């Protein structure tokens, strides 16, 4: 079985004030309990880029590509809701609504729709993120206690090949959660230094670890005082369903043709 958890891993290089950045020395094995995953320090409002890099395990996002995918995806979204084609240029409409990205600094103001992260992961899932070609990128949004979010966390937890995801909180911040070699879920947040650590959490600084994904998500929810969740993760479930649906349709057509041939 092709694992959804097959990125590049890196050795740790601690910097000042507890900030962790990592070298480019590839080990290609899950990190040990004592080692951190690749992590970047928050730069302005660029958490979407930091979370994708952490998901890949290295500095991987090409900014011009990312900006283009944002603008193209936003154009598709605005076309679907009938906001374009009214005698005003598409770029003007997108800029007027604060979603057009012309340069990386625009991320500090505009932020990014989860559909953009999905589109970037979809486009580069094999080339940059070492994901199976036939997997889909799923985006699930909802309240932390909603049945949709609870169901997705349960399904991810029980799937041994699905070991990384991007989590959106408060509708404004993205971070990455990954499973290490001893099956602990690590919270990789470019804003780790802003977390309000309790006495219990002090032993888990930099990349807090938890036994279950649910515990990790709940921890982030407490840190940001937000019950709003966005889960962005790879899955083969929907592609497998489509495959079996296609097989079912083919079999039904074949049986129908056979029946007609017997009576003709």
Image (cartoon, grey):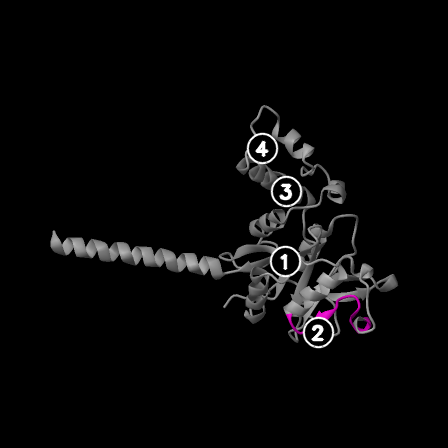
Residue 25 makes an appearance in the image: no
Few, some or many residues within 10 Å of mark 1 (<14, 14–19, 20+): some
Q: Which residue is drawn at 74% across and 71% down?
A: 35
- Label placed on residue 143: 1
Few, some or many residues within 10 Å of mark 3 (<14, 14–19, 20+): many
Total tally of numbered discs in the picture: 4
> How far apart are the two marked residues, 2 and 3, measured between alpha carbons?
35 Å
N-terminal label among 4 and 2:
2
- Label placed on residue 130: none
Q: Residue at x 67, y 37 (%)?
A: 100
> How far apart are the two marked residues, 1 and 3, measured between alpha carbons?
25 Å
- Label placed on residue 83: 4
N-terminal label among 1 and 3:
3
* Kind of element beneath mark 2: loop
Quadrant in the picture for residue 69: top right
Which residue matches tag 3? Answer: 70
> How far apart are the two marked residues, 4 and 3, measured between alpha carbons?
17 Å
Region rendered in magenta:
202-212
N-terminal label among 4 and 3:
3
Residue 225 image position (x, y, % from top left): 75, 59
Which residue matches tag 2? Answer: 32
Q: Which residue lies furthest to the left in this view?
A: 264
Residue 75 image position (x, y, % from top left): 59, 37
Closer to the eye: label 4 or 2: 4
N-terminal label among 1 and 2:
2
Quadrant in the picture for residue 34: bottom right
Q: Residue at x 56, y 62 (%)?
A: 147
């Amino acid at each position: 079985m092709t694992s959804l958890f097959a990125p590049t891993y890196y050795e740790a290089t601690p910097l000042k004030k507890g900030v962790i950045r990592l070298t480019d020395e590839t080990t290609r094995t899950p990190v040990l309990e004592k080692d951190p995953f690749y992590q970047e320090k928050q730069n302005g409002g660029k958490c979407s880029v930091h979370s994708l890099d952490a998901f890949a395990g290295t500095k991987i996002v090409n900014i011009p590509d990312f900006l283009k995918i944002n603008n193209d995806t936003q154009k598709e979204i605005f076309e679907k809701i009938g906001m374009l084609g009214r005698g005003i240029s598409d770029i003007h409409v997108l800029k007027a609504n604060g979603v057009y990205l012309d340069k990386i600094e625009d991320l500090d103001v505009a932020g990014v729709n989860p559909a953009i992260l999905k589109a970037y992961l979809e486009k580069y899932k094999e080339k940059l993120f070492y994901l199976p070609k036939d997997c889909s990128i799923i985006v699930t949004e909802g309240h932390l206690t909603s049945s949709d979010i609870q169901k997705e966390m349960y399904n991810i937890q029980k799937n041994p090949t699905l070991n990384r995801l991007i989590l959106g909180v408060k509708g404004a911040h993205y971070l990455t959660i990954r499973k290490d070699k001893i099956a602990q879920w690590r919270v990789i947040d470019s804003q780790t230094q802003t977390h309000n650590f309790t006495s219990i959490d002090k032993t888990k600084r930099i990349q807090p670890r938890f036994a279950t994904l649910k515990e990790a998500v709940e921890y982030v929810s407490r840190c940001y005082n937000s019950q709003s969740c966005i889960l962005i993760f790879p899955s083969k479930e929907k592609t497998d369903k489509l495959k079996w649906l296609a097989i079912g349709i083919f079999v039904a057509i074949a049986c129908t043709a056979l029946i007609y041939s017997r009576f003709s």
